[in-house]
């Protein structure tokens, strides 16, 4: 086989490759079930984290009530919880302050 025939065969092969048309979005009937599972997971995680936050608050309140003060570890947990609350509501605080 000579070089010209090889180049022609390669050009014909490359011409058959479709051009890149970008990402293809699958139809909604294909992704609907997966999206539903994702929503269930999201809300389950939010509910579990909310319950754990309430449980941690109750634990800190009971510990403070029994001992009159919090230990070093409990103080750190309280500071992290307050910091997380302030960070989560920072958008609302910024709107009030500005």
Image: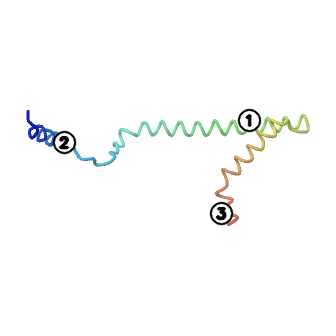
Which type of secondary structure does the marked residue at label 3 adopt?
A: helix
At horizontal 84% and vertical 35% (from top left) the residue drawn is 62
| Nearest to viewer (mark 2 / mark 3) | 2
C-alpha separation, residue under disc 2 versus residue under disc 1? 63 Å
- From the viewer's perspective, is 74 left or right of 42? right
Task: State the image coordinates of residue 67 (x, y, percent, origin top left).
Answer: 90, 35
- Label 2, on which residue? 14
Comes first in the chain, label 2 or label 1: 2
- Label 1, on which residue? 55
At horizontal 75% and vertical 36% (from top left) the residue drawn is 56
Image quadrant for the C terminus? bottom right
- Label 3, on which residue? 95
Task: State the image coordinates of residue 6 (x, y, percent, origin top left).
Answer: 12, 37
Front residue (pair 36, 84): 84
C-alpha separation, residue under disc 1 versus residue under disc 3? 30 Å
Residue located farthest toward the front when viewing the structure as drawn = 3
| Nearest to viewer (mark 2 / mark 1) | 2
| Nearest to viewer (mark 1 / mark 3) | 3
Comes first in the chain, label 2 or label 3: 2
Which type of secondary structure does the marked residue at label 1 adopt?
A: helix
C-alpha separation, residue under disc 2 versus residue under disc 3? 57 Å
Number of labelled discs?
3
| Residues tagged 2 and 3 counted as in contact (Cβ below 8 A) | no
Q: Residues within 10 Å of mark 3 (few under 14, many from 20)?
A: few
């Amino acid at each position: 086989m000579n070089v010209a025939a090889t180049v022609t065969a390669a050009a014909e092969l490359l011409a058959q490759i479709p051009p890149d048309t970008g990402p293809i979005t699958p139809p909604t009937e294909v992704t609907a079930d997966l999206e539903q599972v994702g929503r269930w997971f999201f809300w389950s995680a939010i509910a579990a984290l909310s319950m754990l936050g309430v449980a941690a608050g109750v634990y800190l309140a009971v510990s403070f009530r029994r001992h009159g003060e919090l230990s070093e570890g409990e103080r750190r947990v309280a500071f992290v919880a307050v910091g997380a609350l302030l960070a989560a509501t920072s958008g609302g605080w910024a709107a009030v302050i500005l």
